[in-house]
Each structure stands twice: as C-alpha cells, then as structure tokens.
C-alpha cells in the first residue's frame, strides 16, 4: 500500500505582498486519482424489497403483507451475494398494507424500514402503489366496500374508477399524511409519484380528466417539498402539469428490453422505440440537471444472458445508453449478475450518478488564529449527473490535541459532469491552538459533520476525510 508521501504531488509557491517585507507560501496539492467502485449516497444499484446483507430470494412484485422480521437477521455482515452493495434500498408497497383501515396508517412499518436502512448505510426509496391487477392485490378492503366490485374500466390496468371522486380523495389523503410525517426525513431518498395503473406504473394516465389528474398529483407536489419526487413518464399533459408544480426526476421500467416482446409487437422495444422518443417528446432530456434519472431492470440479467442471448456487446449498449440518459440509480431487483459481466457492471457503477475527483487544491502554509484561510480548488465530476442533495464541503484541521471543522459555501448540487472550480475562504477561530495540523477535506453529512461522500482520490483516512497536507497555526 502506498504511504502518504505518494498520495499527492505537492508544490510550494511563494506569494509576495506589496508593501510588506513578508511572504506567504502557498501549498499546491494535486491528488492522485483512483479507479475504485465507490458506494456513495443516492447513486448506483439499489437493493429491492430488502437491504444490504439480506440476500433474500428476489421479489419482483409489490409487497402486500411484508414482515419486518425478514430484514433483521444479518449479524454485521451486510454484503450482497452476486449483486453490488448499494446506498439505496427501494421498497414498493401496496396501499392496502399501509392503510388497512380508513385513516389508520402503518407508520411503524415505514419507521422501521428507515431505521434498518440507516443501519445498513442506505436510504429508503419508496413507492406506495394503489393496487395491482389481481383481486388479492387490490385497493384496501374498506375502499373496495365503498366503490363496489366492478373491475372493468376504460383502461385494462385500472381496477377501480379513478374518476370516482372518492379515489383521489382517499388515496390523496394517504399521500398527504405520508408527506406530513416523512417529507425531508434524512433517510428517505425519494418518493415515486404513483397515481394509477397496476403497481402504480401509470397505465391510463393519459385518459384521466384534468380535474382528477391534478387532484392526484397535487397530493404529492403539495406534500413533498423537501424529499425528491420521481415521475414515471406517462401522459404528456400530466408530465407537463407536474413539472409546472415541482422539480421532479423521472424513472422508467424495463431497461434492457432489446427484443423481449418484439415478435408480438411488430418489432417495438423500450430501448429502441420508447425511451429516446418519450424523453424528447415529453421534454425531459434536461431534467437530469436538477433531479435524478432512475431505471429498473427488464426481467433480470440472468434472463438477459440465458433466455435472450445477450452478449457483452448488448450489455455495453444498454449501459452506454443509460449513461447517455444521465442515469443516477438502477433497480436490478436484487437479482444476480452473470459472473463474466462484472467488469462491465463495475464500469457502469463508476459512471452512474456523480464521481468527484479533486484535481487541484491550494492553501496557505501558515496562518494565525482569526485569519482567513483562502483556498482554490478544481474538481472533475467524472459521472453523468450531479449530486442532488446539498452535502457541505468542509475543511478539517486536525492534530492529536485538536480538531476544527470549517464549512465552506460550496453547493455541490451545481457540480455537473466535467470541470468545476470552487474558490473560497473560511476564517479560523480566534481561540484556535497553535501547532502543526493535518489539512483534510471532506464532503460531509450536514447533521453529523461526519464525512459522507467518497472521493475518487488517494489519501482517505479511516474516518472518511482526505489528507491534503500540513498547515501551521502560529
């Protein structure tokens, strides 16, 4: 393993100040880039209907009666078998489970999901789906008793009439209650904007009246002002209306469909005939700059290989198309990956979402308490998207006796792919103790001030900060 001296290329320049018989040395650091897969907040693969380390059989469906005990057995071993570890746990749960009786919500279950996610170094991505297609995966029994047994409506993926005013009222009440309790929760990654269709996938959205569509979507946009919303792109009018009300990301199912149903659908596929056209026609091609793009696997990767005969060329095409669309996270449904495909999967993980490389950092060699620590920095985002949460960029000065964290004004949400410059100055405390300090940098959790985001550079300390050099406090 390389020692600290090899972590950085350090230059010292001398800045002379006019009118003064003094000089200030400037330390210039050029960190060494690494090629590791980095598990960082809000990006990469997700687990589905389970957490890191659970290794349950893949569950491709919506949860109807989940048991929280299923997710509490690992004894500190949170590794996933045949699947990447992740920073996101995605759960999709039926309305009937969340609200088994009118106005009575199973918040204890969601509370526990959030708690377990935190323990496994994940955040919770959540969808409450109104219903599935089968009678056993219906709307809540109490709501079915109000509207009767009819299940045949204008769209084959509706099991109740969304134009019945009670639907938007009661489903909307549940979503508003969800937002009232959880909007802004630090361990809640995002909420799927789910209103109609099997599993809440949006089937028939384009058939909704304006009044009903607005009532259903307003329940989300009025209730979630802090937690990001992601939109399954269905219905152009609904998409335009939602965008007028909130900044939303988008998600699509069935990534990898190159030929799944082409024989029955006159050659139509998601990858060739739906994603490119819909993204442009719905004017969503720039949404990634402000909100995340999410995809979900079509079937699973073992079926890609064994049933559909995909080879590495097909896999690379799927990966590269998703990167072109600025993917941040991918729900692989916790299904196994063919062993020989891991090099491509690792390549994908290194590009998905954001990946920050600190290219250059300059700072003064010596300062006195109360003086201004001016610095310059050049960052490269080698991913395909920004980070959508405002994690502070901080400088830490640390020695055996003292630790001082200085928070900058950086807004990393603006660091789009490519080069980003950030120069700033932070004041040292007046009572800071003299001595030699390690100057470290980190992108931190705003609640705990602990290092949160891994950088693609050498020099990482056991507590997640990155050593840049020494500083003398006189």
Image: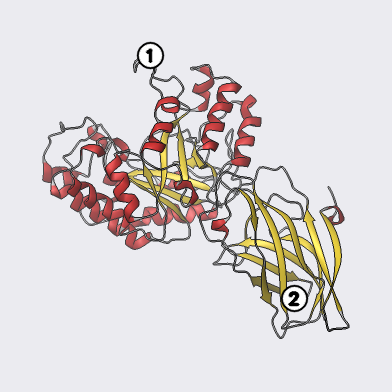
Q: Residue at x 33, y 42 (%)?
A: 65
Q: Secondary structure at mark 2?
A: loop
Q: Residue at x 55, y 27 (%)?
A: 317
Determine the image quadrant of residue 396.
bottom right
| Mark 1 vs mark 2, CA separation in Å | 68 Å
- Regarding residue 96, the answer to whether it shows in the image is yes
Q: Is residue 434 above or below residue 93?
A: below
Image spot of residue 166 (x, y percent)? 15, 49
Q: Residue furthest top?
A: 263
Front one among 175 and 280: 280
Q: Is residue 58 above or below residue 172?
A: above
Image spot of residue 33 (x, y percent)? 75, 48
Q: Is residue 314 above or below residue 19?
A: above
**Looking at the rendered structure, which numbered label has been put on residue 263?**
1
Front one among 169 and 367: 367
Q: Choose the circle earlier in sequence order: 1 or 2.
A: 1
User: Residue beneath label 2, please?
Assistant: 402
**In the displayed structure image, the side of residue 229 where residue 152 appears, left or right:** left
């Amino acid at each position: 393993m390389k020692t600290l001296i090899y972590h950085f290329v350090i230059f010292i320049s001398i800045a002379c100040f006019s009118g003064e018989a003094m000089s200030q040395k400037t330390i210039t650091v050029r960190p060494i880039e690494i090629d590791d897969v980095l598990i960082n907040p809000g990006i990469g693969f997700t687990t589905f209907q389970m957490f890191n380390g659970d290794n349950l059989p893949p569950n491709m469906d919506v949860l109807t009666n989940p048991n929280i005990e299923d997710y509490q057995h690992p004894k500190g071993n949170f590794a996933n078998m045949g699947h990447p570890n992740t920073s996101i746990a995605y759960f999709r749960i039926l309305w009937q489970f969340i609200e088994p009786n009118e106005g009575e919500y199973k918040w204890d279950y969601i509370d526990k999901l959030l708690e377990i996610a935190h323990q496994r170094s994940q955040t919770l991505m959540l969808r409450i789906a109104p219903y599935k297609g089968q009678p056993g995966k219906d709307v809540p029994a109490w709501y079915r008793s109000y509207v009767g047994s009819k299940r045949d409506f204008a769209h084959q993926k509706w099991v109740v009439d969304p134009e019945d005013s009670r639907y938007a009222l009661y489903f909307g009440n549940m979503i508003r209650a969800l937002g009232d309790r959880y909007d802004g929760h630090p361990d809640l990654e995002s909420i799927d904007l789910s209103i109609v269709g099997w599993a809440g996938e949006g089937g028939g959205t384009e058939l909704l009246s304006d009044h009903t569509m607005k009532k259903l979507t307003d329940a989300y946009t009025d209730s979630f002002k802090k937690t990001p919303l992601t939109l399954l792109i269905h219905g152009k009018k609904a998409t335009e209306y939602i965008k007028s009300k909130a900044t939303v990301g988008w998600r699509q199912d069935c990534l990898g469909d190159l030929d799944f149903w082409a024989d029955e659908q006159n050659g139509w596929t998601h990858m060739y005939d739906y994603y490119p056209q819909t993204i442009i026609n719905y004017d969503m091609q720039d949404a990634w700059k402000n909100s995340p793009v999410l995809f979900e696997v079509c079937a699973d990767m073992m079926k890609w290989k064994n049933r559909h005969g995909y080879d590495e060329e097909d896999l690379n095409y799927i990966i590269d198309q998703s990167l072109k669309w600025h993917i941040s996270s991918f729900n692989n449904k916790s299904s196994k990956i063919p062993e020989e495909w891991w090099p491509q999967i690792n390549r994908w993980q290194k590009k998905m979402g954001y990946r920050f490389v600190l290219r250059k950092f300059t700072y003064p060699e010596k300062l006195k308490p109360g003086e201004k620590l001016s610095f310059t920095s050049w960052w490269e985002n080698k991913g395909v998207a920004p980070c959508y949460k405002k994690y502070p960029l901080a400088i830490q000065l640390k020695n055996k006796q003292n630790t001082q964290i200085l928070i900058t004004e950086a807004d990393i949400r603006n660091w789009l792919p490519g080069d980003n410059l950030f120069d700033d100055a932070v004041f040292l405390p007046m009572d800071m103790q003299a001595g030699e300090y390690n100057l470290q940098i980190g992108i931190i959790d705003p609640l705990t001030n602990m290092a949160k985001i891994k950088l693609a550079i050498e020099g990482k300390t056991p507590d997640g900060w990155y050593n840049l050099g020494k500083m003398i406090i006189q």
